[in-house]
Image: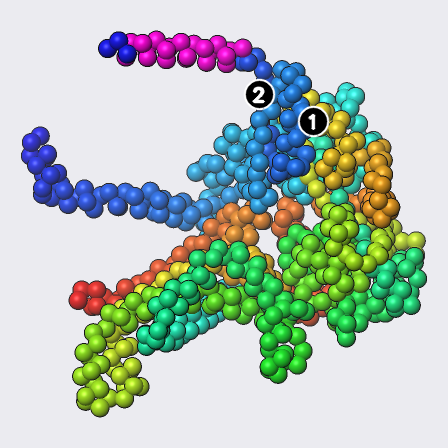
Amino acid sequence: MGIRKHSIAVALALTTAAFGGLSAKAEDVKLTLWSLDRDIQPAPNLIKEFNAQNNGIQIEYRQIQFDDVVSEAMRAYSTGKAPDIIAIDNPNHAMFASRKAFLDLTDMIETSTVIKPQNYFPGPLKSATWDDKYYGVPKATNTIALYYNKDLFKAAGLDPNKPPQTWDELVETARKLNDPSKNVYGITFCAKANEEGTFQFLPWAQMGGASYKAINGEGAVRALTIWKQLFDEKLTSPDTLTRSQWDSTATFNAGNAAMVISGPWEIDRMLTDAKFEWGTALLPVPQQGAQRSSAMGDYNWAIFSSTKHPKEAFKALEFFASKDATMYKDFGQLPARADLPVPPTGNAVKDAALATFIEQMKYAQPRGPSPEWPKISKAIQDAIQAALTGQMEPKAALDQAAEKIKSIEG
Amino acid sequence: MRRIFASVRDGRGFDIMLVGVPFTFLFALAGLPLIYNILMSFQEVDMFSLGSFIRPFVGFDNYVALFKQPETIPILTNTVVFVVGSIAGQFLLGFGLALFFWTNFPGASWLRGLFLVSWVMPGLVVGAIWNWILSGDFGVLNFFLRESGLIDGNIFWRSDPDFSLWAVVIANIWLGTSFNMILLSVGLSAIPGDLYEAAEMDGANAWQRFWTITLPMMRSTIGAIISLGLIFTLQQFDLFAAITDGGPNNSSNVAQYWAWDLSFRQYDFGRGATISVIMTVFVMFAAAVYVRSTRHEVRG
């Protein structure tokens, strides 16, 4: 009995102590944040720094897998269990913003001293915009440009400092570099049956003056015809249809393709894997002087409209934005900021590549924004693949896609 | 009170309880999701109604819209080709291997166990490895075919619409053969040896013994294998994700992958559920055929 009484007393003491401990912290506002960032990526680290400030706001982090971000967020929102803040892939932003699942931040951004719209690249900002209102803040950004193998340029008698500028030059250069006897394709890119395929094709259509709303425009048909030409003449591997951007670039790094279209996420791997001199160039345009365009990737921050602490959540976003300046140095991701120069890394090749991507970033355009983006994207992927496998003519394939997109958008 | 207690302990109540426990379990974990899925196929579902039961009822709209899509019929055809091709390949190779190991040469059982390695490997890993093997430019399969003089140029297994579905079938056959082999080996070892002795005395040759003893005695095992094969191939998802993504232009897309794509990539949950219902009907039909064909064996 004595022991039992004693233990009850101890338990009671412990409980009071625990409650005491809790009540001291109860004034803190608790926020939850979801993102797919791993421990070496921005979100968890920025949160750690933010929490260390002890400013009365504590953020709890939950990591979500890439494939689950949207479906988890939907389920959570529809059952009233949404987090306060989420990092969302930019083409999915409009789906949530258009249904007012995200909070309209326009007024808060107007008075903010940290987050200023004019500081951002137009493409990323547009992806967080719906109906001329800001429903989020770009978290990071990326785009695609042309990488080319300078050694192979020299071997083919081409000037390694004069990468192709126009589509015709690109095809011509690819022909000269193509060497089946040495297992070298002229160029590689990604026409896969997923979002990556759309990501790579859309800039071409946009450079040709088309848009996803008019995907069968003349410029888009010409772009797809050029892509088909690359396949028909075997200037690119037929597996470009099923390889991811990452895998395609691996064939470039191995010397099996003389050019590749991909993004800045390749730089570090290329520096170690590619045993040759390489350079970067802006995406070739339809003809000299034509408008430029490029793809735009990466995530936006958004606050769910169901949050009980919009002010505190916005404070967190301001804190994240204030760390944009060191984002590349700390995490190797490009901030979506036009006002922040990426500091030199000390590696001339890397700095030159980064300069190309930052220049290309100015022309990057978001996919959409449309709440029905995933379906629109699927229609575009199907058209690209139908044309490239020779099952349909480029014009017919894009006409069909345009019709599908029209019925999707209603 | 006492009667009820007695009945539960030993009587009808006990029987009902025995049936009730697994039935409740099945209903909660398989029945409810199935009913929910059928319900969803008749509703308009989007992200904001995902959490509620009551959603706009659209009748057969999802079904009609689905069959209006130009890719539906090719994808359903692909599914049949994938299932039949995979099961035929897995079964024939598995049976061949089982008969081979049945001869019981030294180390046979040991080797047979090793074959299971392919079965225990995760689908995504198998997919990634086959992704390399089937690669057009530097894939091992093309290398062997070229060196043995079977082909002149490289076959782009994953990217040629004429081959892409077969690329996944090949990988799936490799994945499922060992499982078939093990189950068939068990069936083979259950056949009494004296049957063969008697047949041999009567002068039956190896071929006759196979057709008149082995095959008939294996009937229920073969039925089970094929229905399990049907379930496993209709569940096969990882290989598609790893090898072709259903491309190019849906030429290797099958119903199960498409259902996932519609639900979780295009967020059209209603249509995704519709495909699942169509698949369920298909599987139930196949299951009914299987149950009928093996009924008298089960009752002994």
Q: Vertical placement of A360 versus A20: above or below?
A: below
Q: Quadrant of the N terminus of chain B?
A: top left
**Towards the viewer: B74 or B84:** B84
Q: Chain of mark 1?
A: A
Q: Residue at x 55, y 52 (%)?
A: B261
Helix, strand or loop status at disc 2:
strand
Can see residue A395?
Answer: no
Give amino acid for label 2: Lys
For residue A30, the mark is 2
Name the residue that disc number 1 marks.
A317
Give amino acid for label 1: Leu
Residue B189 locus on image (x, y percent)? 27, 70
Q: Residue at x 45, y 66 (%)?
A: B83
Does the magenta portion include A8?
yes
**Towards the viewer: A153 or B103:** B103
Does the magenta portion include A196?
no
Residue B44 locus on image (x, y percent)? 50, 45
- Furthest-bottom residue in view? B203
Residue A212 locus on image (x, y percent)? 73, 51
What stretch of residues is rendered in magenta? A4-24
Q: Residue at x 34, y 75 (%)?
A: B105
At label 1, counting other C-alpha atoms closer than 10 Å, the crowd grade (few under 14, some 14-19, many 20 or more) is many
Q: Chain of mark 2?
A: A
Answer with the quarter of the image where residue A343 lies: top right
Q: Residue at x 83, y 37 (%)?
A: A342
